[in-house]
Amino acid sequence: MEQPSISWGPVAGAALAIVLLNLTGMLWLGVSQERARADIAQLARQVRETPASSAPADLSPELKSLRESLDTLAAKVDGLAATADPKAVARLAAEMKNLSNRVEALAAVKAAPAKAVKPAQPARPAQTAPPRPIIEDDQPPRPFYGPGYPAWPGY
């Protein structure tokens, strides 16, 4: 009895097509991941370059005067930083930040339309997530495999 001969041409063609599709998919995934990393790096750079406080232009005169007085206090604290006790300067800076936050809250209340006040919900304990490092421009890119890869298993 003669065994039928198998034609390996179509099988090899299908295997080659599957390998090429896998390689194309991996290449596309790498390119899209690199584009996303570049976009995130550009966004992080823009966030670092934006000023910390962008106030609305239509503030009331009281809020403008408070902001100007805070700016003069900031200049005085910067002047004291070189000559005074570091603890005192840190305390003054913390108080000034507290005042600045209160001014921002007043500005937000003035700018926001009157809304119905919701009852306060009980405060939930803050969940601390591990900080995610931002890739700086001067750092080498992370590898796409191996122990430096963010999704590399820890075992």
Image (spheres, rainbow, N blue to C red):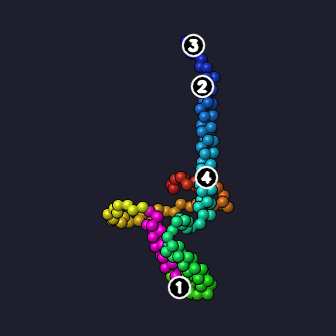
Q: Please identify the quarter of the rendering in which residue 48 is found.
A: bottom right
Residue 107: horizontal and vertical position, in percent? Answer: 47, 68
- The secondary structure that most of the magenta stretch takes on is helix
Mark 2 vs 4, N-terminal side:
2
Q: Which residue is mark 2?
A: 11
Q: How far is the residue under mark 3 from the one under mark 4?
A: 63 Å
Tell me, yes or no, if residue 121 can be seen here: no
Residue in the foreground of this view, choosing between 132 and 67 = 67
Residue 8: horizontal and vertical position, in percent? Answer: 62, 23
Mark 3 vs 4, N-terminal side:
3
For residue 2, the mark is 3
Numbered disc in front, either 3 or 2:
2
Residues shaded magenta: 92-112
Q: Please identify the quarter of the rendering in which residue 42 is found.
A: bottom right
Give the residue at x 51% y 82%: 91
Residue in the foreground of this view, choosing between 26 and 6 = 26
Reply above or below: 113 against 100.
above
Q: How far is the residue under mark 2 from the one under mark 4?
A: 42 Å
Reply above or below: 19 against 38.
above
Mark 1 vs 3, N-terminal side:
3
Q: How far is the residue under mark 1 from the one under mark 4?
A: 41 Å
For residue 39, the mark is 4
